[in-house]
Image: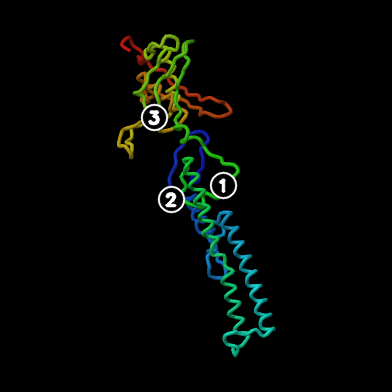
Protein backbone atom coordinates (compact mmCIF):
# COMPACT_ATOMS: atom_id res chain seq x y z
CA UNK A 1 0.00 0.00 0.00
CA UNK A 2 1.13 3.53 -0.71
CA UNK A 3 1.52 6.24 1.89
CA UNK A 4 -1.80 7.88 2.69
CA UNK A 5 -3.94 4.83 1.99
CA UNK A 6 -6.63 4.05 4.56
CA UNK A 7 -7.05 0.61 6.12
CA UNK A 8 -10.78 -0.02 6.24
CA UNK A 9 -10.70 -3.17 8.36
CA UNK A 10 -8.61 -6.11 9.42
CA UNK A 11 -5.16 -6.44 10.95
CA UNK A 12 -1.73 -6.62 9.45
CA UNK A 13 1.90 -5.56 9.56
CA UNK A 14 3.51 -2.91 7.43
CA UNK A 15 7.07 -2.57 6.17
CA UNK A 16 8.27 0.99 5.60
CA UNK A 17 10.36 1.26 2.43
CA UNK A 18 10.29 5.03 1.83
CA UNK A 19 9.67 8.13 3.94
CA UNK A 20 9.16 11.83 3.35
CA UNK A 21 9.50 12.98 -0.25
CA UNK A 22 10.36 9.45 -1.34
CA UNK A 23 6.76 8.28 -0.88
CA UNK A 24 4.01 8.64 -3.46
CA UNK A 25 2.47 11.56 -1.57
CA UNK A 26 5.90 13.17 -1.36
CA UNK A 27 6.29 12.74 -5.10
CA UNK A 28 2.91 14.40 -5.67
CA UNK A 29 3.91 17.28 -3.41
CA UNK A 30 7.14 17.67 -5.35
CA UNK A 31 5.29 17.72 -8.67
CA UNK A 32 2.90 20.36 -7.35
CA UNK A 33 5.77 22.48 -6.05
CA UNK A 34 7.64 22.18 -9.35
CA UNK A 35 4.56 22.80 -11.49
CA UNK A 36 4.24 19.17 -12.61
CA UNK A 37 7.93 19.04 -13.41
CA UNK A 38 7.70 21.76 -16.06
CA UNK A 39 9.81 24.88 -16.30
CA UNK A 40 8.50 27.95 -14.48
CA UNK A 41 6.08 29.89 -16.64
CA UNK A 42 7.15 33.31 -17.78
CA UNK A 43 5.51 36.28 -19.41
CA UNK A 44 7.05 38.47 -22.07
CA UNK A 45 9.91 36.01 -22.24
CA UNK A 46 11.59 36.95 -18.96
CA UNK A 47 9.01 37.99 -16.33
CA UNK A 48 7.63 35.29 -13.99
CA UNK A 49 3.96 34.43 -14.44
CA UNK A 50 2.15 34.88 -11.10
CA UNK A 51 -1.38 34.94 -12.47
CA UNK A 52 -2.23 31.60 -10.83
CA UNK A 53 -1.69 33.06 -7.33
CA UNK A 54 -3.55 36.31 -7.90
CA UNK A 55 -6.73 37.27 -6.10
CA UNK A 56 -9.75 38.42 -8.14
CA UNK A 57 -8.98 42.05 -7.30
CA UNK A 58 -5.37 41.73 -8.40
CA UNK A 59 -6.43 40.07 -11.65
CA UNK A 60 -8.98 42.83 -12.34
CA UNK A 61 -6.44 45.56 -11.59
CA UNK A 62 -3.93 43.93 -13.91
CA UNK A 63 -6.59 43.69 -16.62
CA UNK A 64 -7.52 47.34 -16.07
CA UNK A 65 -3.89 48.43 -16.19
CA UNK A 66 -3.39 46.53 -19.44
CA UNK A 67 -6.42 48.21 -21.00
CA UNK A 68 -5.30 51.66 -19.89
CA UNK A 69 -1.81 50.99 -21.21
CA UNK A 70 -3.07 49.87 -24.62
CA UNK A 71 -5.43 52.87 -24.89
CA UNK A 72 -2.62 55.25 -23.87
CA UNK A 73 -0.27 53.82 -26.50
CA UNK A 74 -2.95 54.05 -29.20
CA UNK A 75 -3.78 57.66 -28.29
CA UNK A 76 -0.10 58.65 -28.13
CA UNK A 77 0.60 57.07 -31.52
CA UNK A 78 -2.39 58.89 -32.98
CA UNK A 79 -1.26 62.23 -31.53
CA UNK A 80 2.25 61.66 -32.85
CA UNK A 81 0.97 60.93 -36.36
CA UNK A 82 -1.40 63.91 -36.43
CA UNK A 83 1.26 66.23 -34.97
CA UNK A 84 3.88 65.22 -37.53
CA UNK A 85 1.32 65.49 -40.36
CA UNK A 86 0.34 69.00 -39.24
CA UNK A 87 3.98 70.03 -38.80
CA UNK A 88 3.80 70.92 -35.13
CA UNK A 89 7.08 72.27 -33.76
CA UNK A 90 8.40 73.43 -30.42
CA UNK A 91 7.19 77.03 -29.85
CA UNK A 92 10.37 77.90 -27.96
CA UNK A 93 12.57 76.40 -30.68
CA UNK A 94 10.83 76.50 -34.08
CA UNK A 95 13.87 75.03 -35.83
CA UNK A 96 13.34 71.65 -34.09
CA UNK A 97 12.09 68.83 -36.32
CA UNK A 98 8.34 68.14 -35.88
CA UNK A 99 8.84 64.40 -35.37
CA UNK A 100 11.30 64.97 -32.49
CA UNK A 101 8.94 67.42 -30.76
CA UNK A 102 5.94 65.07 -31.16
CA UNK A 103 7.95 62.16 -29.73
CA UNK A 104 8.49 64.18 -26.55
CA UNK A 105 4.77 65.05 -26.44
CA UNK A 106 3.71 61.40 -26.98
CA UNK A 107 6.07 60.07 -24.31
CA UNK A 108 4.86 62.72 -21.86
CA UNK A 109 1.24 61.77 -22.46
CA UNK A 110 2.03 58.06 -22.10
CA UNK A 111 3.73 58.63 -18.74
CA UNK A 112 0.87 60.83 -17.53
CA UNK A 113 -1.70 58.18 -18.53
CA UNK A 114 -0.23 55.60 -16.11
CA UNK A 115 -2.64 55.34 -13.12
CA UNK A 116 -0.08 55.59 -10.35
CA UNK A 117 -2.71 56.31 -7.72
CA UNK A 118 -4.66 53.05 -8.18
CA UNK A 119 -2.38 50.88 -5.95
CA UNK A 120 -2.50 53.53 -3.24
CA UNK A 121 -6.29 53.79 -3.38
CA UNK A 122 -6.67 49.99 -3.30
CA UNK A 123 -4.31 49.70 -0.34
CA UNK A 124 -6.23 52.35 1.59
CA UNK A 125 -9.55 50.63 0.81
CA UNK A 126 -8.26 47.23 1.96
CA UNK A 127 -6.79 48.78 5.10
CA UNK A 128 -10.18 50.26 5.98
CA UNK A 129 -11.77 46.83 5.44
CA UNK A 130 -9.10 45.22 7.62
CA UNK A 131 -9.81 47.77 10.36
CA UNK A 132 -13.54 46.96 10.22
CA UNK A 133 -12.81 43.22 10.49
CA UNK A 134 -10.58 43.77 13.53
CA UNK A 135 -13.56 45.37 15.28
CA UNK A 136 -15.36 42.03 14.77
CA UNK A 137 -12.42 40.06 16.24
CA UNK A 138 -11.13 38.90 12.85
CA UNK A 139 -7.37 39.20 12.48
CA UNK A 140 -6.12 39.48 8.88
CA UNK A 141 -2.41 39.08 8.24
CA UNK A 142 -2.45 39.94 4.54
CA UNK A 143 -4.47 42.75 2.97
CA UNK A 144 -5.25 40.60 -0.07
CA UNK A 145 -7.13 38.20 2.22
CA UNK A 146 -9.69 40.92 2.97
CA UNK A 147 -10.72 41.08 -0.68
CA UNK A 148 -10.61 37.29 -1.06
CA UNK A 149 -12.83 36.80 1.97
CA UNK A 150 -15.24 39.42 0.65
CA UNK A 151 -15.53 37.51 -2.63
CA UNK A 152 -16.48 34.26 -0.86
CA UNK A 153 -20.16 33.38 -0.81
CA UNK A 154 -19.91 30.03 1.02
CA UNK A 155 -17.37 29.10 3.72
CA UNK A 156 -17.09 25.41 4.68
CA UNK A 157 -15.24 24.63 7.90
CA UNK A 158 -14.73 21.62 10.12
CA UNK A 159 -15.83 22.22 13.68
CA UNK A 160 -13.68 19.45 15.20
CA UNK A 161 -10.80 21.02 17.06
CA UNK A 162 -12.33 24.50 16.95
CA UNK A 163 -15.73 24.30 18.58
CA UNK A 164 -15.03 20.93 20.19
CA UNK A 165 -11.95 19.18 21.56
CA UNK A 166 -12.16 16.30 19.11
CA UNK A 167 -12.32 13.77 21.97
CA UNK A 168 -14.99 11.10 22.17
CA UNK A 169 -15.96 10.25 25.75
CA UNK A 170 -18.42 7.92 27.43
CA UNK A 171 -21.09 9.69 29.50
CA UNK A 172 -23.68 6.92 30.09
CA UNK A 173 -23.80 3.14 30.05
CA UNK A 174 -26.47 0.45 30.45
CA UNK A 175 -25.71 -2.75 32.33
CA UNK A 176 -27.83 -5.24 34.29
CA UNK A 177 -31.09 -3.45 33.37
CA UNK A 178 -29.84 -0.27 35.02
CA UNK A 179 -28.45 3.00 33.75
CA UNK A 180 -25.17 4.47 34.94
CA UNK A 181 -23.48 7.83 34.50
CA UNK A 182 -19.80 8.08 33.57
CA UNK A 183 -18.18 11.26 34.86
CA UNK A 184 -14.93 12.82 33.74
CA UNK A 185 -13.55 14.63 30.76
CA UNK A 186 -11.09 13.73 28.06
CA UNK A 187 -8.89 10.62 28.21
CA UNK A 188 -7.76 10.95 31.83
CA UNK A 189 -9.03 7.84 33.67
CA UNK A 190 -8.13 9.31 37.06
CA UNK A 191 -10.78 12.01 36.72
CA UNK A 192 -14.40 11.05 37.28
CA UNK A 193 -16.16 7.87 38.30
CA UNK A 194 -19.14 5.68 37.41
CA UNK A 195 -22.30 6.31 39.41
CA UNK A 196 -25.86 5.03 39.39
CA UNK A 197 -28.23 7.24 37.43
CA UNK A 198 -31.08 7.00 39.94
CA UNK A 199 -29.25 7.46 43.25
CA UNK A 200 -25.85 8.85 42.30
CA UNK A 201 -24.06 6.20 44.37
CA UNK A 202 -20.66 4.92 43.35
CA UNK A 203 -21.06 1.92 41.02
CA UNK A 204 -17.41 1.04 40.40
CA UNK A 205 -17.80 -2.21 42.34
CA UNK A 206 -21.11 -3.27 40.79
CA UNK A 207 -20.88 -6.70 39.19
CA UNK A 208 -22.91 -5.64 36.16
CA UNK A 209 -20.68 -2.64 35.49
CA UNK A 210 -17.44 -4.56 35.84
CA UNK A 211 -18.69 -7.47 33.73
CA UNK A 212 -19.84 -5.17 30.96
CA UNK A 213 -16.63 -3.15 30.92
CA UNK A 214 -14.47 -6.29 31.02
CA UNK A 215 -16.33 -7.69 28.01
CA UNK A 216 -15.96 -4.35 26.25
CA UNK A 217 -12.23 -3.98 26.90
CA UNK A 218 -11.61 -7.52 25.66
CA UNK A 219 -12.99 -6.39 22.30
CA UNK A 220 -10.64 -3.38 22.16
CA UNK A 221 -7.18 -3.15 20.70
CA UNK A 222 -6.64 0.43 21.88
CA UNK A 223 -4.31 1.35 24.73
CA UNK A 224 -3.76 4.47 26.82
CA UNK A 225 -0.25 5.87 26.98
CA UNK A 226 1.17 8.59 29.22
CA UNK A 227 2.98 11.27 27.24
CA UNK A 228 4.51 14.64 28.10
CA UNK A 229 2.90 17.72 26.66
CA UNK A 230 5.52 19.65 24.64
CA UNK A 231 3.97 23.03 25.45
CA UNK A 232 3.19 22.72 29.16
CA UNK A 233 5.49 19.85 30.13
CA UNK A 234 2.64 18.12 31.98
CA UNK A 235 1.79 14.44 31.71
CA UNK A 236 -1.38 13.58 29.83
CA UNK A 237 -3.09 10.45 28.57
CA UNK A 238 -3.16 9.73 24.85
CA UNK A 239 -5.00 6.83 23.16
CA UNK A 240 -3.11 4.60 20.77
CA UNK A 241 -5.46 2.92 18.35
CA UNK A 242 -9.08 3.30 17.29
CA UNK A 243 -10.65 6.51 18.50
CA UNK A 244 -14.01 4.77 18.96
CA UNK A 245 -12.47 2.30 21.41
CA UNK A 246 -10.73 4.98 23.49
CA UNK A 247 -13.85 5.89 25.57
CA UNK A 248 -14.34 2.22 26.45
CA UNK A 249 -10.73 1.85 27.58
CA UNK A 250 -10.96 5.04 29.67
CA UNK A 251 -14.18 3.87 31.35
CA UNK A 252 -12.64 0.46 32.09
CA UNK A 253 -9.62 2.18 33.63
CA UNK A 254 -11.93 4.07 35.99
CA UNK A 255 -13.08 0.79 37.58
CA UNK A 256 -9.57 -0.64 37.75
CA UNK A 257 -9.26 -2.63 34.52
CA UNK A 258 -6.06 -2.15 32.57
CA UNK A 259 -5.49 -3.02 28.94
CA UNK A 260 -3.21 -5.80 30.14
CA UNK A 261 -6.28 -7.57 31.49
CA UNK A 262 -6.90 -8.89 28.00
CA UNK A 263 -3.63 -10.81 28.28
CA UNK A 264 -5.18 -13.04 30.93
CA UNK A 265 -7.66 -14.31 28.34
CA UNK A 266 -6.16 -15.90 25.21
CA UNK A 267 -7.86 -14.55 22.11
CA UNK A 268 -8.87 -17.36 19.78
CA UNK A 269 -10.68 -15.48 17.02
CA UNK A 270 -11.32 -11.88 16.05
CA UNK A 271 -13.73 -10.53 13.43
CA UNK A 272 -13.00 -6.81 12.98
CA UNK A 273 -15.70 -4.17 13.06
CA UNK A 274 -17.38 -3.41 9.76
CA UNK A 275 -19.94 -0.82 8.77
CA UNK A 276 -22.19 -3.48 7.27
CA UNK A 277 -22.27 -5.71 10.38
CA UNK A 278 -22.02 -2.79 12.84
CA UNK A 279 -20.29 -5.00 15.39
CA UNK A 280 -17.00 -6.63 16.31
CA UNK A 281 -16.57 -10.25 17.39
CA UNK A 282 -13.84 -11.50 19.71
CA UNK A 283 -13.63 -15.10 20.91
CA UNK A 284 -11.56 -15.90 24.01
CA UNK A 285 -10.61 -19.14 25.70
CA UNK A 286 -12.13 -19.52 29.16
CA UNK A 287 -9.64 -19.54 32.01
CA UNK A 288 -10.17 -19.91 35.72
CA UNK A 289 -8.96 -16.51 36.90
CA UNK A 290 -10.85 -14.81 39.74
CA UNK A 291 -11.71 -11.42 38.28
CA UNK A 292 -14.20 -10.31 40.92
CA UNK A 293 -13.68 -10.68 44.63
CA UNK A 294 -15.25 -9.45 47.82
CA UNK A 295 -12.37 -6.96 48.28
CA UNK A 296 -13.39 -4.93 45.21
Q: Label 3 vs label 1: CA separation?
A: 46 Å
Q: Residue 101: percent from the left, percent from the top?
A: 60, 83
**Crowd tier of the residue under label 3, counting other residues whose Cα lies within 10 Å: few below 14, some 14–19, many 20 or above:** some
Observer-nearest of 11 and 79: 79
Reading the image, the residue beneath label 1 is: 150
Query: Looking at the image, can residue 179 be seen?
Result: yes
Q: CB atoms at circles 3 and 1 under 8 Å apart? A: no
Observer-nearest of 131 and 291: 131
Observer-nearest of 287 and 241: 241
Query: Looking at the image, can residue 242 be seen?
Result: no
Q: Label 2 vs label 1: CA separation?
A: 37 Å
- Residue beneath the point at 40% across and 11% down: 200
Reading the image, the residue beneath label 3 is: 223
Mark in the foreground, 3 or 1: 1
Of label 2 and label 1, which has the lower sequence position?
2
Of label 3 and label 1, which has the lower sequence position?
1
- Residue beneath the point at 43% across and 50% down: 20
Considering every residue shown, the one lying at the far front of the view is 92
Of label 2 and label 3, which has the lower sequence position?
2
Considering every residue shown, the one lying at the far bottom of the view is 95
Mark in the foreground, 2 or 1: 1
Q: Residue 21: percent from the left, percent from the top?
A: 45, 53
Q: On the rendered structure, is 1 left or right of 190?
A: right
Q: Label 2 vs label 3: CA separation?
A: 27 Å
Amino acid sequence: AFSGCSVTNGKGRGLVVETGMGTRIGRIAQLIADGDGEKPKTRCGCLPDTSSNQTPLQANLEHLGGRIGVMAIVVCIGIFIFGVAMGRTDPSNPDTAPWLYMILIAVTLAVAAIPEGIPLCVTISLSIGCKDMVKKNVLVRKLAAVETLGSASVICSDKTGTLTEGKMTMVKMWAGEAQYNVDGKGFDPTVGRITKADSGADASADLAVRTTLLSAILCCNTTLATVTDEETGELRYEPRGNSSEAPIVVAARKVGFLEEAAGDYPRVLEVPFSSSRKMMLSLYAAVLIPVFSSDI
